[in-house]
Amino acid sequence: MELYLDRRAVRQIRLSAQEAIEEDDTESLREDVLEAFTEDQVEEIERRLDNGDFFEFLTDVLDEWSGDDVDELFELLETQLGEVGIDLKTEAKVAEGDDEEEEEEDDADEDDEDVDEDYLDDDE
């Protein structure tokens, strides 16, 4: 079975993992990873786990994680889920580039709005 994490979920996990690395604290990271999955995804994962507890599964993954590299965390998640028959798919590489492009587009839109407002103010 394949599970897909959307860009928002991947971004959420990446940001939380980076914060966990900086603060040396995985408690919030575990919660954020759990929240990144939909309820249906969590239920499917729990059906396949021996103990049926995704939270405990995440605890084990985070215990195995060195806490130094975000990509390593994704690799561990993919590997551990793969062992229970779940192929985790992410758009991590694409998401990073798209986020930057989206931010640039948002900035450009904001600049356009400022110009439009200035133009209207000059006419008055």
Image: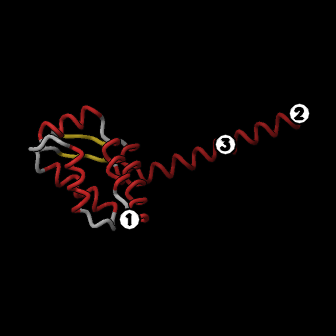
The residues tagged by marks 3 and 1 sit, at their Cα atoms, a distance apart of: 37 Å
Q: CA distance from mark 2 to mark 1?
A: 56 Å
Residue shown at the point (18%, 40%) measured from the top left: 45
The image position of residue 95, as x and y in percent, is: 40, 49
**Residue at the spot 88% in from the left edge and 37% down from the top edge:** 122
What is the quadrant of the C terminus in the image? Answer: top right
The residue under label 1 is: 24
The outermost residue toward the right is 124
39 displayed left or right of 10: left
Q: Amino acid at mark 3?
A: Glu
Question: Is label 2 or label 3 in front?
Answer: 3
Above or below: residue 71 compared with residue 2 = below
| Crowding near the residue tagged with mark 2, few <14, some 14–19, many ≥20 C-alpha atoms within 10 Å | few
Mark whose residue sits in front, 3 or 1: 1
Amino acid bearing label 1: Asp
Q: Residue 93 location in percent, x, y?
A: 36, 54
Q: Are marks 2 and 3 in contact (CB under 8 Å)?
A: no
Label 3: few (<14), some (14–19) or many (≥20) C-alpha neighbours in 10 Å: few
Residue at which label 2 appears: 123
- Of labels 2 and 3, earlier in sequence is 3
Q: Nearer the viewer, mark 2 or mark 1?
A: 1
Q: Residues within 10 Å of mark 1 (few under 14, many from 20)?
A: few
Secondary structure of the residue carrying tag 1 is loop
Q: Residue at x 30, y 44 (%)?
A: 34
> Disc 2 residue type?
Asp
Q: Residue at x 18, y 42 (%)?
A: 53
| Camera-nearest residue between 92 and 82 | 82
List the residue tagged with mark 3. Answer: 110
N-terminal of the pair, mark 2 or mark 1, is 1
Vertical placement of 70 versus 103: above or below?
A: below
